[in-house]
Image (cartoon, rainbow, N blue to C red):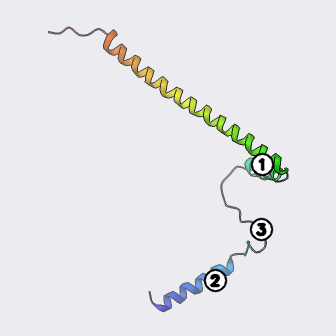
Amino acid sequence: MNSQDRSNFQQRLQELEAQIPNETTSGQRLEPNLPINSDAAATLPQIANWFYNLPDVLKIVAIAVAAVLSFTLLRTVLQLVFSLITLAVVGGLVYFAYKFWITPQPPES
């Protein structure tokens, strides 16, 4: 890379930096551009404001309740998955038992 290419890159970089508004010095947070539905976009800031306005003790209680609910939901989903796996294994065993013991075997010649 020669010096002229390097200076062109530096100049282009400075132009791009000048075009970007300086959001961090104005005190505003940069929000990611994530595709979420409008209901969630309206609800999340309300929940965040509610949480930040709670006293410290209630924040701990809210976090504990959320953790308990999350683990309960996770446990329920895992129990459902394990039940489906058990059902598949039992179904396979029943199928093989039917195939080998109940269906008539062709006569051997």
Q: Is residue 60 left or right of residue 20?
A: right
Proximity of marks 3 and 1: CB atoms separated by less than 8 Å: no
Residue lying at the far front of the rendered structure: 57
Q: Report the mark closest to the observer, 3 or 2.
A: 3
Residue lying at the far bottom of the rendered structure: 3
Asked if residue 23 is positioned above or below residue 8 in the image, the reply reads above
Proximity of marks 3 and 2: CB atoms separated by less than 8 Å: no
The crowd level at tag 2 (other Cα within 10 Å; few <14, some 14-19, many 20+) is: few
The answer to which quarter of the image holds residue 28 is bottom right
Label 1 vs label 2: CA separation? Answer: 38 Å
Kindly identify the residue that appears in the image at 67 percent across and 61 percent down. Answer: 32
Name the residue carrying label 3. 28
Kindly identify the residue that appears in the image at 54 percent across and 31 percent down. Answer: 81
Regarding mark 2 in the picture, which secondary structure is present there? helix
Give the amino acid at mark 1: Thr
The crowd level at tag 3 (other Cα within 10 Å; few <14, some 14-19, many 20+) is: few
Label 3 vs label 1: CA separation? Answer: 20 Å
- Foreground: 80 or 75? 75
The crowd level at tag 1 (other Cα within 10 Å; few <14, some 14-19, many 20+) is: few
Asked if residue 29 is positioned above or below residue 58 in the image, the reply reads below
Q: Report the mark closest to the observer, 1 or 2.
A: 1
Q: Quadrant of the N terminus?
A: bottom left
Among numbered discs 3 and 2, the one appearing first in the sequence: 2
Asked if residue 61 is positioned above or below residue 109 in the image, the reply reads below
